[in-house]
Image (tube, helix red, strand yellow):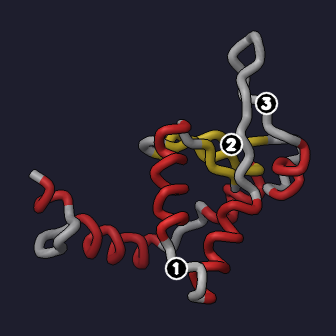
Amino acid sequence: MLKSLPQKEWDKIAAKLAALNQYVAANREVTRFILNGATEVQLDDSGRLLVPKKLLEYAKVEKDVVVLASFNRIEIWAKEQFDKAANYDMKVMSASAEQVLGNGNEGSIETLS
């Protein structure tokens, strides 16, 4: 899966990465992982996002693609990979939704209002 973000959002992530202590192995590894595939892309004259071939290969995009809006990001999936990832166990998902969105969770929907 690939993620596309506006430059302003990428700048926030880059600033956080730059602020990490690079003498800590986990910080170096995460920074390297995130920056390894970071690529600035352009829109063509028709407004289409031009995704480099190396990124399409990384995401295993060959033919069919799923594009999702995810708040301030766009996710680009190979359809086969998305279908695997979206095969949720509904009992597990229900419990996770309750934990994340339910009462009492500091980051829950109820505490945001």
Q: Position of residue 17 (x, y in %)?
A: 53, 65
**Mark 1 = which residue?**
21
Residue 95 falls left or right of residue 28: left
Query: Which is in the foreground here, disc 1 or disc 3?
Result: 1
Front-most of residues 23 and 30: 23
Mark 3 or mark 2: which is in front?
Answer: 3
Residue type at mark 1: give it. Answer: Asn
Which badge, 1 or 2, is on the more N-terminal residue?
1
Q: Give above or below for 97 relative to 22.
A: above
Q: Residue 90 at what x, y percent from top left?
A: 44, 70
Q: Amino acid at mark 3?
A: Leu
Q: Tag 2, which secondary structure?
A: strand
Q: Earlier in the sequence, mark 1 or mark 3?
A: 1
Q: Nearer the viewer, residue 69 or 63?
A: 69
User: Where 60 falls versus 102 (above or below)?
Assistant: above
Task: Count every numbered label the image shows and give the total.
Answer: 3
Which badge, 3 or 2, comes first in the chain's sequence? Answer: 3
Q: Position of residue 111 (x, y in %)?
A: 11, 61
Q: Nearer the viewer, mark 1 or mark 2?
A: 1
Which residue occupies 60% across, 65% down?
87
Res 50 label: 3
> Tag 3, which secondary structure?
loop
Q: Which residue does the numbered mark 2 point to in the structure image?
A: 66
Badge 3: how crowded within 10 Å, few (<14), some, or many (20+)? few
Residue drawn at (70%, 56%) of the image: 1
